[in-house]
Image (spheres, rainbow, N blue to C red):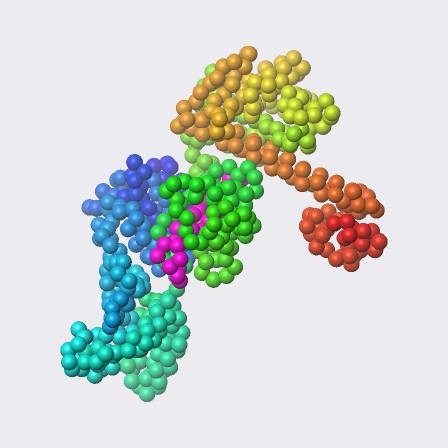
Amino acid sequence: MASEHLEHKLALLPALPGCYLMKDINAQIIYVGKAKNLKNRVRSYFKSSHEGKTAKLVSEIVDFETIITSTNKEAFLLEITLIQKHQPYYNIKLKRGTGYPYIKITNERDPQLLITGEVKKDGGFYFGPYPDVYAAQETLRFLQRVYPLRRCQGHQGRPCLYYHMGQCLGACFKEVPESLYATQIKAIKRFLNGQVDPVKKNLTAKMTTAASEMQFERAAELRDQLHYIEATVEKQKIISNDNTPRDLFAFYVDKGWISIQIFFIRQARLIRREKRLFPCVSTPEEELATFILQWYNRKNNVLPREILVPTGVEKAVLSDILKVPIRTPQRGEKKALLELAQKNSRLVLEEKFRLLELDNRQTIGAQNEIMAALGLPNGHVIEAFDHSHIQGADPVSALVTFVDGRAEKKLYRKYKLTETPERAGANEDANTREVIRRRYSRLLKEGKPLPDLILMDGGIVELNAAKDVLINELDLAIPIAGMVKNNHHRTASLLYGETADQLIDLDPKSQGFYLLTRIQDEVHRFAITFHRQLRGKNSLSSKLDDIQGVGPKTRTKLLKQFGSLKHIKAATVDEIEALGISKTVAQTIKLSL
């Protein structure tokens, strides 16, 4: 029977093709599988009865993760790579080598076409691996007939049988020009790299002719040959068309968190996938750029020859620092790979949020842990505050509310704080007093319920200011604590007590600590987002206000129609005039911007 955690993850599985990785109690990958429908296949492990090896496998599974692909065939090929990389205990058949063949052009004076099960650094050209072994063998036979190289042992002094059949260039009894081999090898490479349309058209025409002449066995043979070609050499998104070592970064952002996926393409295959989740403080493009720089600053992460990133990332800056080409693909296979990575990013982040919402251990139980650590009775509502400003300019405060350990976004509040000369600089004391006074005097006036705990994101200054307003001005006895961060700007402990001198530490591995981290990250994100919006609006408004002839009404028209300074700059004089603005003012706006 699946655990509650697994039940929640099973409910979130997508009905898409892909691979799944089963993990044991030590987080070790013990089995890798593929599926046309991840939802049905993975659920079958926990919802059906099993015997033998499968029953033993299921008994050891405590967690799993998935990687979606575009087709079932891509899942097949990705499974091979994952098994090679992780060597799972229960994947007996495919542990050694790939278990699937490659088509090889040998590196010899008289080269051959072969089927092989392993790749060696011998100068040969390898294509594959091919999931359908029989299709690969039939494709090899087709190539040997259409683009013959050497089929015999060579230098026999007489023509071999294959030469008489037109499937050998004659190395058995004569010296074949290297240029002839080069021509054939070029055609074979083109074919195995997916350029099969001319060959398929030719086979289709022959099949149609054979059928019209009632040569049905010949038509069936040609039909099968077409099938083998399609099964063997059709293009994959998981398999790149060239051997350039490249890393691919994609992201998805929601609820203040960024999910990053890294695909590592080596030897024309996806050999590794990494994922990271963390709060998104600045823009997602900036967060990704910083992450990429930090990623390659580690000793074990080697730079590839090319890095692919989404639109909006500062490619020129990153390329100048890393000395590697950084590109954003606009079409084709690379763009499809980028979209696939982004889709995986989204699934990982959505799974995180849904699991947090579904698991009571991370909601009510976690909140009770925080209350117990402070010596308080179990409550239901926690409110948290944080401030944001730039050297005192445009000060704002934000309030987030968690009910039974879950964020209630309808109860979030934003506060634009008073900006006066007396508050020049980062006046956290005055900012805290204002927002606490406004929030709780209003609740008292409206007769609304008060929270069970208030958390301040800051140190002793914010905590003492809030306590003073609550107790001495509003006569309220709401418990209040400060969320303290360590040198790495991460949640460390709670500041509490009548004189704010007690540091309450939570177990870093506990659900209570995890909830506290989420609250602190969420209120910080909410405050920064509000401040960024306000600062951008003020900046745009001030630039428009500086233009002669632009008053509040004209400014409102421009902002409502175009939304941003960038769009106003791009507008024509006629488009600005169309808003009821005079031609002179419209020309002035264009010149000023």
Image location (x, y in percent) of residue 498:
55, 12
Residue segment shown in magenta: 239-267
Residue 49 in view here: no
**Depth check, front residue: 297 or 461:** 297
What is the chief secondary structure element of the magenta stretch?
strand
For residue 8, above or below residue 575: above
| Residue at point 42%, 28% (across, down) | 511
Query: In the shown orientation, is residue 326 left or right of residue 391?
Result: left
For residue 572, above or below residue 515: below
| Residue at point 73%, 26% (across, down) | 420
Image location (x, y in percent) of residue 285:
54, 45
Image location (x, y in percent) of residue 141:
26, 73
| Quadrant assignment for the N terminus | top left
Image location (x, y in percent) of residue 2:
32, 39
Query: In the shown orientation, is residue 200 left or right of residue 407?
Result: left
Magenta highlight on residue 150: no
Query: In the shown orientation, is residue 476 left or right of residue 130?
Result: right
**Depth check, front residue: 281 or 135:** 281
**Depth check, front residue: 346 or 419:** 419
| Residue at point 52%, 59% (across, down) | 330
| Residue at point 21%, 83% (across, down) | 164
Residue 189 in view here: yes
